[in-house]
Image (spheres, rainbow, N blue to C red):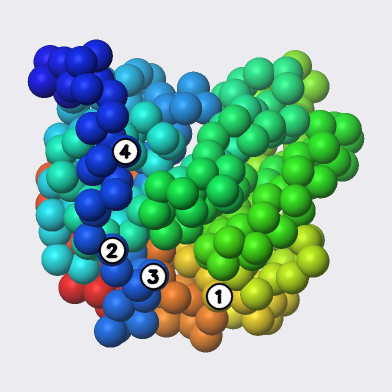
Amino acid sequence: MSELTAVRSRHPEAIAEAAARRPRRPLLGPSGRLLVVAADHTARGALSAGGRRLAMADRADLLERLCVALSRPGVDGVLASSDILDDLLLLGALDGKVVMGSMNRGGLFGASFELDDRFTGPSAEDLARRGFDAGKLLLRIDPDDPGSLRTLESAARAVDAMAACRLPVFVEPFLCRRDPGGPLRTDLTAEAVTTSLTIASGLGATSAYTWLKVPVTEDADAMADVLRATTLPVVLLGGDAGTRPDDAERAYERWGAVLGLPGVRGMVAGRALLYPPDGDVAGAVDRVAGLVGCG
């Protein structure tokens, strides 16, 4: 950590230099499958993982876990906010990997404006300039919150900008509602997830470069019908794997049942890989790589 801080303070240009010389690769490798590790939670103030409220706030620990994950066979790349990508560039951990920038982090966790999810991360032009490979945007829609409309319009313009740069954009859509006086809740029923996919698929002037990042529904058996709503390529969303090994096993079983469906090209998973219940990052990554078909 001290070395990273020293470089940042004395030689900030080293980050751009590392990005410029980074060996690149296609989005999809020979297997046609994709496994990406997600670490963009912190920029939205979402720090809990594995039952610990501030687990992701320890940057040295997070970077160590990311480097372990990125070193495992079958891991194609990383999704992260710019500060984490800059650290990983300086560590040389992104050579030959897919680098995906997280574009909108303005909807801070638990805030009253959480659904007015402003684009506070890299733009399409930023991603192209830095030689990164894709972007991701979060699209949460609550019919009772006008912030969702602003986010929807901004997301459409981001899809257009990514298409103009010929960069893939991974859209993560949810229908959600805020309980009176309570937290924001996502609706993972089959009908809600289906509806969210149709909305996300129609964003912008073209969907040529759009992928969908999709949660598994409460009833995993319904996913075959849910995915009939789109022809866009899909990656599954992996959330927290819980605090017990049997929680993780149930998550793996649910993911494995869906990963073979038509249209599904892989998975983007974060806390389940970086903070597994047994603490074995390499083991969790290898398990999921095997499910995806990358390992």
Residue 26 quadrant = bottom left
Question: Which residue does the numbered mark 3 point to in the structure image?
Answer: 27
For the residues bearing labels 1 and 4, Cβ distance under 8 angstroms: no
Dot 1 or dot 2: first in sequence order is 2
Dot 3 or dot 1: first in sequence order is 3
Q: Position of residue 261 (x, y in %)?
A: 49, 82
| SS under mark 3 | loop
Nearest to the eye among marks 4 and 2: give it: 4
Q: Residue at x 82, y 37 (%)?
A: 150
| SS under mark 4 | helix
Question: Which residue does the numbered mark 1 point to in the structure image?
Answer: 233
Q: CA distance from mark 1 to mark 4?
A: 31 Å
Q: CA distance from mark 3 to mark 4?
A: 21 Å
User: What amino acid type is highlighted by mark number 1?
Assistant: Pro
Question: Which residue does the numbered mark 4 point to in the structure image?
Answer: 16
Question: Which residue does the numbered mark 2 point to in the structure image?
Answer: 24
* 229 sits left or right of 248 in the view: right
Nearest to the eye among marks 3 and 2: give it: 2
Q: Residue at x 71, y 59 (%)?
A: 160
Q: CA distance from mark 1 to mark 2?
A: 22 Å
User: What amino acid type is highlighted by mark number 2?
Assistant: Arg
Nearest to the eye among marks 1 and 4: give it: 4
Q: Position of residue 35 (x, y in %)?
A: 33, 64
User: What amino acid type is highlighted by mark number 4?
Assistant: Ala
Q: CA distance from mark 4 to mark 2?
A: 15 Å
Q: CA distance from mark 3 to mark 2?
A: 9 Å
